[in-house]
Image: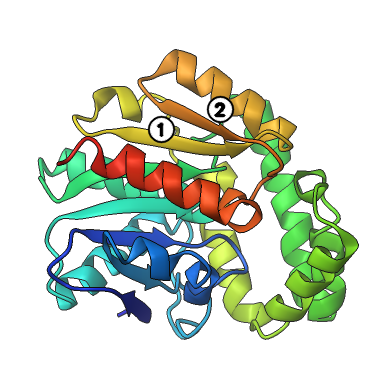
């Protein structure tokens, strides 16, 4: 089973929160206490992260990751739940929604995504992404972890971070285990991900996508995705890739309104 942290009253609607690559269940501690006034929050450590470092998955690993998450929720006695995933967690959340739809399961109450990719469709882009991920994976196990993190957070998608924010992330992420991260990174490469651009259109539940206006790459992707599906886009000023970290109060207010407003 995956390790997890709970917030709130178990009689409230369950909300499962999935962090991004390099993160862990404590990434939600800034917003989970307030969210727990309305939800029973369950924050999971993805395989290779946090206290789930002993959990390895095959490559490709999306199906195995989905099975681990659902089994962990079964172990907690959680039947129906809302689901929110950030970045890598969002990509895995898409696969959870796809799996439950294929099984005709009523477990998923709503799907919320934050700065995540629905999957590559162009063979050349897939080939290039595989090459890029090979390079990053090699750096992950050959460089000192802090050196890897310095390179990682210099990527354009993190351009909005201040020097202080970047340093704080590097310090927080330095407790990770490189080989455990390596396994998850390889197994959940975007190059191996199912293309799920059309999934929101086929779901009978609300689907929300949260984006920062300073994250130009994902803002463009989100606008394109909205035109192709029934995804509801929510944009935030003064935020980049990680909306819930940059604008926690605005995110909490929007999330509660969007999620519970359609389920009361």
Tell me residue 127's x, y (percent): 68, 37
Q: Residues within 10 Å of mark 2 (few under 14, many from 20)?
A: many
Is 224 left or right of 81, judged from the image as shown?
right
Is 134 left or right of 150, judged from the image as shown?
left
Give the residue drawn at x 74%, y 37%: 214
Is 90 left or right of 69, judged from the image as shown?
right
In this rendering, is residue 51 above or below 7?
A: below
Count of number-bearing discs:
2
Residue found farthest to the top: 227
Tell me residue 5's x, y (percent): 37, 79
Give the residue drawn at x 86%, y 62%: 151
Residue at the spot of label 1: 196
In front here: 165 or 21? 165
Is residue 263 something one can see in this rendering? yes
Tell me residue 99's x, y (percent): 24, 46
Residue at the spot of label 2: 222
Is residue 94 something one can see in this rendering? no
Q: Quadrant of the N terminus?
A: bottom left
């Amino acid at each position: 089973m995956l390790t997890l942290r709970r917030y709130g009253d178990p009689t409230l609607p369950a909300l499962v929160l999935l962090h991004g690559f390099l993160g862990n269940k404590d990434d939600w501690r800034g917003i989970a206490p307030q969210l727990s006034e309305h939800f029973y929050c369950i924050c999971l450590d993805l395989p290779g992260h946090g206290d789930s470092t002993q959990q390895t998955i095959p490559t490709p690993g999306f199906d195995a990751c989905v099975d681990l998450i659902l089994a962990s929720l079964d172990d907690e006695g959680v039947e129906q739940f809302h689901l929110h995933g950030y970045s890598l967690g969002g990509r895995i959340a898409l696969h959870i929604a796809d799996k439950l739809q294929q099984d005709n399961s009523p477990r998923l109450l709503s799907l919320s995504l934050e700065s995540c990719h629905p999957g590559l469709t162009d063979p050349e882009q897939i080939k290039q992404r595989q090459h890029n991920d090979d390079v990053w994976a090699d750096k992950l196990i050959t460089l000192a972890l802090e050196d890897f993190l310095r390179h990682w957070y210099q990527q354009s998608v993190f351009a909005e971070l201040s020097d202080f924010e970047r340093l704080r992330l590097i310090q927080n992420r330095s407790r990770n285990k490189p080989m455990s991260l390596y396994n998850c990174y390889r197994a959940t490469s975007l190059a191996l991900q199912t293309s799920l651009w059309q999934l929101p259109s086929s779901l009978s539940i609300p689907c929300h996508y949260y984006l920062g206006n300073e994250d130009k790459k994902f803002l463009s992707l989100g606008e394109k995705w909205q035109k192709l599906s029934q995804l509801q886009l929510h944009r935030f000023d003064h935020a980049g890739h990680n909306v819930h970290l940059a604008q926690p109060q605005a995110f909490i207010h929007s999330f509660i309104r969007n999620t519970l407003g359609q389920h009361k």
